[in-house]
Amino acid sequence: MALVFPFHPRVTVTLLVLLSVLSLAAGGKLLVVSVDGSPWFSTQELLGILRRKGHEIVVVAPEVTLHLKPSENFALKTYPVPFTQDEMDGNARAFFKDAFEEGSFLERFFRLQEKLKILTESAFITCEQLLNNKEIIRYLEESKFDALFTDPVFPCGAILAEHLSIPSVYFARGMPCGLDSEATQCPSPPSYIPRPFTGNADRMNFLQRAKNILVDASNLFLCNFFFQPYEKLASEFLQRDVTVLELLRKASVWLLRYEFVLDYPRPMMPNMIALGGINCAHKQLPQEFEAIVNASGEHGIVVFSLGSMVSEIPMKKAMEIADALGSVPQTVLWRYTGEVPPNLPKNVKLVKWLPQNDLLAHPKTRAFITHGGSHGVYEGICNAVPMVIMPLFGDQMDNAKRVESRGAGLTLNILEMTSKDISDALKAVINDKKYKENIQRLSDLHLDRPIHPLDLAVHWVEFVMRHKGAPHLRPAAHDLNWIQYHSLDVIAFLLAVVLLFLFISLKCCMFCCRRCCSKKGRKSKSKSKTH
Ligand SMILES: *[C@@H]1O[C@H](CO)[C@@H](O)[C@H](O)[C@H]1NC(C)=O
């Protein structure tokens, strides 16, 4: 006791009172601008902890959302949008269903682009509705927030942070068209940092590096397509000309769902925090699921989910999958809400929802069939469960490639896979010890860390609220123009000095030579005269 409180009792009491007052004063006010979709799940967990630590949280979201629902942890401010829940669900469903539709590469590319356009357009309309909603904007102006938390992929939050003059914390896996490295000023050499969607790893041959650079070039157009509308909207709303890049560069801290067990080693800026595995906090497995796992016997279970967005699969494909699942002795828990395949084997249980991470954490879980979203892949790694990955779109192909290249799972092509392919892959990851060993090694490395990513995220959000941003972490690169950043002016100057020096030396030489020659000439002339 004497060691803990080495002060006079009255001093101790004063200290305790001071501490409690300080912890009260630490309660800040955080504004969250709708991060819908699967990132919302980890955001929600983070907000729960912040709430328990005494912070006040306001989430701004459209009336129609996919996963974002009210909670006691935050006040939800909604605003109307010109589409219904059915329309939104329909669009999302159509988008994911498309991944299973066959066709040539180009056909699929254009179809995907069309669907993507619908999704990004509805996100843009949502942003427009928020910024044009006078009532909400006035409310936000009047409530003095300490910081804003947002996913920068749709830059609505960034625009709002600028308008309210509050520091912002970004939470993302990456940005479309590589805008994140531009916005953070983080070096990203295409020689060893694979670009998203290229299927490249960090060690690339000449052609792969060429592909990387071509992707960088095409990103210039893609960025324009994606962010141009926001630039116009932001300029109108803020009443001055701004670019999206300029707004994104003001972020105080980037919380990135990276981790170097899955992602390749690369430079990071001091305000970029790697938070991969943030979604792996364990809870109690619900009774009904524990009963299923207990009943599975010595063979254990397989967890199968293609994410919260895929609700149906074409029946032909679903039957093939069902057929393959029947070939293993494990009990398969399949999260699926579509029409039940008529050939569903006895060992397969269809469920509308499953506690994915808690099931994966169970020692009886033998394999995980996933679409390869970053959340799912991290849950596989945290819990050391070998994976069979069926990537559908986006970063999922890259995630799958990373897991496969580390020998911790197998990847299947969702369009080409046959029942036998699925069954072979599943049996391999369950029975071949090397997959379990590799994922166990990844898991051990991943979990050997000084602090849980969730606590790290809490720390940085509180840090930004306490210190009104983190300008000390902002690299001066942001204040340089393109010429200065690459030191082209200095190189040009030094080159000019060298050239000038060479030129003068040359002139001197020529002058000396000429004098020498003319002297010799005169001498030889005078010699010939004497003869
Ligand atoms: C499952 O098995 C464990 C260990 O045998 C036991 O503690 C638990 O109560 C069982 N759960 C259910 C729901 O049967």
Image (cartoon, rainbow, N blue to C red):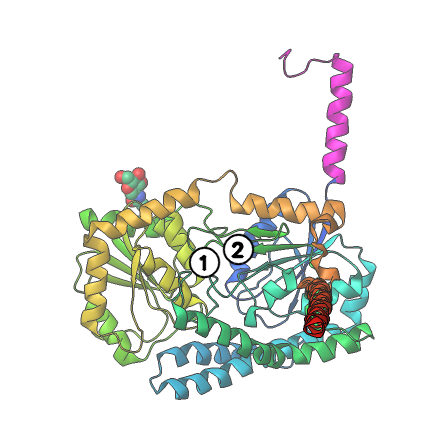
Q: Is residue 328 left or right of residue 447?
A: left
Where does residue 434 sit, x and y in percent of width and height?
A: 23, 50
Up-down relation of residue 135 to residue 428 (above or below):
below
* Cβ at disc 2 under 8 Å from ligand 1: no
Mark number, residue 527: none
Q: Say if the magenta span includes residue 8.
A: yes
Which quadrant of the figure shows ligand 1? top left
Up-down relation of residue 348 to residue 286 (above or below):
below
Where does residue 409 sit, x and y in percent of width and height?
A: 30, 58
Assess whether mark 1 and mark 2 are in contact (beta carbons under 8 angstroms). Answer: yes
Identify the residue shown where x is 80% and y is 55%. Answer: 144
Q: CA distance from mark 2 to mark 1?
A: 9 Å
Q: Give the quadrant of residue 107.
A: bottom left
Q: Which residue is mark 1?
A: 375
Where does residue 223 sit, x and y in percent of width and height?
A: 60, 76
The kind of residue tagged 1 is His
Identify the residue shown where x is 52% and y is 58%. Answer: 41
Q: Nearer the viewer, residue 421 or 247?
A: 247
- Magenta segment: 1-25
Q: Which residue is mark 2?
A: 42
The kind of residue tagged 2 is Ser
Up-down relation of residue 140 to residue 415 (above or below):
above
- For the N terminus, the image quarter is top right
Identify the residue shown where x is 44% and y is 45%. Answer: 282
Q: Mainly helix, strand or loop, the magenta region?
A: helix
